[in-house]
């Protein structure tokens, strides 16, 4: 009888040890470097194939005469020639830098304003009741609507551009932080208060780290609104003294009825938006998720 009980205990102990080992294995994050071939196959090849398919369809529409009017749809080769000419003349990087520098600086200002505003709205009930609906309404307002009043208030200058960016990006950043704070488990806040993390200390050490996923999502959306707002401002309020950014390039192509230039501007705007997302926000988002055990490197 004693032998039977001992065997049962050993079996239960072995099952428990096996379960713990399995859980430990699930929680183990693989830190080995991903093979280059696997990276190329899983990360690089799919977008390259997608771009190639788009270019093939585009060229087919032109080659088979489905769209035979070059003033409506230029060939990929014609757009490439325009891009190459702008590069050889040293103008291409100037177009990109004019818009990117404005966009990043405007986004930085929006970050400085939107972050404390989001904390106030999230943590103070009276302010949330008063300003929360306004922020949501501003977020749904098209950015182009701010261009005419900004021109009237500030004139045709860079300050007008930054004002449009702020009005487009601040609501998204603030609402992202409000959403992140709202999803912080109350247990975290009670534990923080028990350990003495109250007031600003609790906000810095408990609330902000716990709300980081929502905040990063708000930053990502805020950048998208910043970029779109800037393009709207550059298209509508083009002025020689402002320099030629990507929005102005797009408007110049429209005024000249040069569809190759129009497509050049569209491709550059799209490329910059994708590059900023891939180089800045996607790594930041993966780091936040991985640090919380929500993303395991395979």
Image (cartoon, helix red, strand yellow):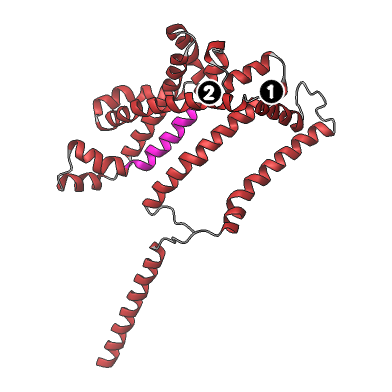
List the residue tagged with mark 2: 98
Q: CA distance from mark 2 to mark 1?
A: 17 Å
Foreground of the two, 88 or 254 = 88
For the stretch drawn in magenta, what is the main secondary structure? Answer: helix
Which residue does the image show at 31% across and 44% down from the upper left? 210
Which residue does the image show at 27% across and 25% down from the upper left? 127
Image position, residue 96 (x, y; %):
56, 27
Which residue does the image show at 39% across and 46% down from the upper left? 288
**Numbered label attached to residue 107:** none
Span highlighted in magenta in the image: 211-225
Local secondary structure at mark 1: helix
List the residue tagged with mark 1: 261
Q: Is residue 150 visible?
A: yes
Image position, residue 88 (x, y; %):
67, 28
25 left or right of 270? Answer: left
Which residue does the image show at 29% across and 40% down from the upper left? 208
Image position, residue 9 (x, y; %):
28, 83
Foreground of the two, 296 or 159 = 159
Q: Quadrant of the N terminus?
A: bottom left
Crowding at mark 2 (Cα within 10 Å: few <14, some 14-19, many 20+) = some
142 left or right of 65? Answer: left
Which residue, as the protein is rendered here, is positioned at the far right?
64
Q: Nearer the viewer, mark 2 or mark 1?
A: 2
Local secondary structure at mark 2: helix
Rendered view: 287 above or below 82: below
Give the mark nearest the N terminus, 2 or 1: 2
261 left or right of 133? Answer: right
Query: Would you identify the image quadrant in which residue 70 lies?
Result: top right
- The question of residue 223 being in magenta is answered with yes
- The question of residue 129 being in magenta is answered with no
């Amino acid at each position: 009888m004693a032998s039977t009980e001992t065997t049962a205990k050993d079996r239960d102990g072995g099952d428990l040890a096996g379960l713990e080992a399995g859980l430990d294995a699930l929680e183990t994050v693989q830190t080995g470097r991903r093979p280059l071939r696997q990276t190329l196959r899983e990360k690089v090849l799919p977008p390259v194939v997608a771009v190639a398919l788009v270019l093939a369809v585009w060229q087919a529409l032109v080659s088979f005469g489905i769209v035979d009017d070059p003033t409506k749809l230029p060939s990929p080769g014609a757009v490439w020639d325009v891009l190459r000419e702008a590069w050889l003349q040293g103008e291409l990087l100037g177009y990109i830098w004019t818009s990117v520098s404005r966009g990043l600086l405007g986004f930085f200002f929006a970050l400085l304003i939107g972050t404390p505003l989001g904390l106030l709205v999230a943590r103070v009930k009276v302010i949330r009741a008063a300003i929360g609906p306004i922020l949501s309404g501003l977020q749904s307002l098209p950015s182009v609507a701010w261009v005419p009043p900004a021109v009237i208030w500030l004139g045709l200058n860079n300050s007008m551009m930054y004002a449009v960016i702020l009005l487009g990006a601040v609501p998204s950043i603030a609402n992202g932080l409000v959403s992140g704070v709202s999803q912080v488990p109350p247990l975290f806040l009670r534990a923080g208060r028990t350990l003495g993390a109250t007031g600003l200390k609790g906000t810095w050490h408990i609330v902000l780290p716990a709300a980081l996923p929502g905040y990063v999502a708000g930053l990502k959306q805020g950048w998208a609104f910043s970029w779109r707002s800037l393009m709207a401002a550059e298209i509508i309020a083009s002025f020689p003294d402002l320099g030629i950014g990507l929005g102005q390039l797009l408007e110049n192509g429209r005024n000249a009825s040069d569809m190759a230039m129009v497509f050049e501007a569209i491709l550059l705007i799209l490329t910059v938006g994708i590059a900023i997302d891939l180089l800045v926000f996607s790594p930041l988002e993966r780091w936040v998720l991985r640090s919380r055990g929500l993303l395991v490197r395979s």
